[in-house]
Image (cartoon, grey):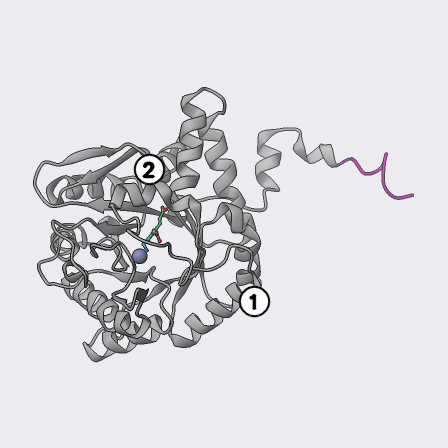
């Protein structure tokens, strides 16, 4: 005889200890990456209204924040810069004295010590925070010029690594950018610096709060001519394949929550580590509902991010990283 009453699935759910013994997936602090926004000035710690609990930080306050993050056991931060001034070519993205370059230099000096107190610094490579039109590459004849963007993105990546970044994360979705960045890094002698590419990045309404934080909303049009159509999964796999072929070491799916089938498919198809980005809109929705008292924030966050792991993510990029790290320690 098989099945009930011989089989009772509830037997292994009886106590938390038993449940823990048969748990298939769990989120660890070492899976987390925390995104941060750096701005010019000193003593700046300005909360982002659409991302409660997240701040725009100047370099000095960023250093303090990063020490705190490292002490929580979080292995890496993902750094975004908000420059003093923007222009048509996004030149603040690739000058040696740019906001991210200066921040990285300081962080690398203060936080890249012994293995146990080291924090890895990942830098976002894109132009939209630096261009006055808010697009991810220069404009020609009213459209984003793919091939002209490649050169600028490669320059951006090299200057960030020269400043001390551990890894670069191109988020622009131009064709050929991983190859362009790989070859520029190699030429500059950084053959060992990994690339985490935003390989399957969808044109998403979930980026709204981030664009407010970075002042990077496009002035005209939208990003649908370079970011992916949310309906496509075969195309996402092709994007990932191409990025790996061009030299991506880690491939990212972004956003995460509405795209966990893509995370699963990428994980099954390719042998590279997969990152899932729990983007600003996903964070804001949970924060807003929790503020109303409608949901239990802590439990919802753990449940959501454990779902990313179950889908196959190796790395989870999230604005909840500090909260999660703290609660996993309890
Ligand atoms: C820049 C970039 C964006 C995000 C990460 N890098 C915004 C966009 O593409 O418009 C979104 C992150 C988030 O929403 O948390 N290319
Ligand atoms: Zn961009």
Q: Quadrant of residue 164?
A: bottom left
Task: Tell me where the magenta segment starts and ends, as one range.
Answer: 1-8
Q: Give the Cα separation between the discs numbered 1 and 2.
A: 31 Å
Percent position of residue 177, x then y: 33, 71
Pointer 1: residues within 10 angstroms few (<14), some, or many (20+)? few
Nearer the observer, 222 or 210 = 222
Q: Please give the name of the residue rendered at 25% of the width and 46% of the height, measured from the top-left corner.
A: 214
Q: Please give the name of the residue rendered at 14% of the width and 52% of the height, measured from the top-left corner.
A: 103
Nearer the observer, 288 or 90 = 90
Mark 2 = which residue?
322
Q: Quick check: is 282 in the magenta stretch?
A: no
247 left or right of 11 in image: left
Q: Quadrant of ligand 2?
A: bottom left
Check disc 2 and report its element: helix, strand or loop.
helix
Percent position of residue 221, x then y: 35, 54
67 left or right of 292 in image: left
Quarter occupied by the N terminus = top right
Marks 1,2: beta carbons within 8 A: no
């Amino acid at each position: 005889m098989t099945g009930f009453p011989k089989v009772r699935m509830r037997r292994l759910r009886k106590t938390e200890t038993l449940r823990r013994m048969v748990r298939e997936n769990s989120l660890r602090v070492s899976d987390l990456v925390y995104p941060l926004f750096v701005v010019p000035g000193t003593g700046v710690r300005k909360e982002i209204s659409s991302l409660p609990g997240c701040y725009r930080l100047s370099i000095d306050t960023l250093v303090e924040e990063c020490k705190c993050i490292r002490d929580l056991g979080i292995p890496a931060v993902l750094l975004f810069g908000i420059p003093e001034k923007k222009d048509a070519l996004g030149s603040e993205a690739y000058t040696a004295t740019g906001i991210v370059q200066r921040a990285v230099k300081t962080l690398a000096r203060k936080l890249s010590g012994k293995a146990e107190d080291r924090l890895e610094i990942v830098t976002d490579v894109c132009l939209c925070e630096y261009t006055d039109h808010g697009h991810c590459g220069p404009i020609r004849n009213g459209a984003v010029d793919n091939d002209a963007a490649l050169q600028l993105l490669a320059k951006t990546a090299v200057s960030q690594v020269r400043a001390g970044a551990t890894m670069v994360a191109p988020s622009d979705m131009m064709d050929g950018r991983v190859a362009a960045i790989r070859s520029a890094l190699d030429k500059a002698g950084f053959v060992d610096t990994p690339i985490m590419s935003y390989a399957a990045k969808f044109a998403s309404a979930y980026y709204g709060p981030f664009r407010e934080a970075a002042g990077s909303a496009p002035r005209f049009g939208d990003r649908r001519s370079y970011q992916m159509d949310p309906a496509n999964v075969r195309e996402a796999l092709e994007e990932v394949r191409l990025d790996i072929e061009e030299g991506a070491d880690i491939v990212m799916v972004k956003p995460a929550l509405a795209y966990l089938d893509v995370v699963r498919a990428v994980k099954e198809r390719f042998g590279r580590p997969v990152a899932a980005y729990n983007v600003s809109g996903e964070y804001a929705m949970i924060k807003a509902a929790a503020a109303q008292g409608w949901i239990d924030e802590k439990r919802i966050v753990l449940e959501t991010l454990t779902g990313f792991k179950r889908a196959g993510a190796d790395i989870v990029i999230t604005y909840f990283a500090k909260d999660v790290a703290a609660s996993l320690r309890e």
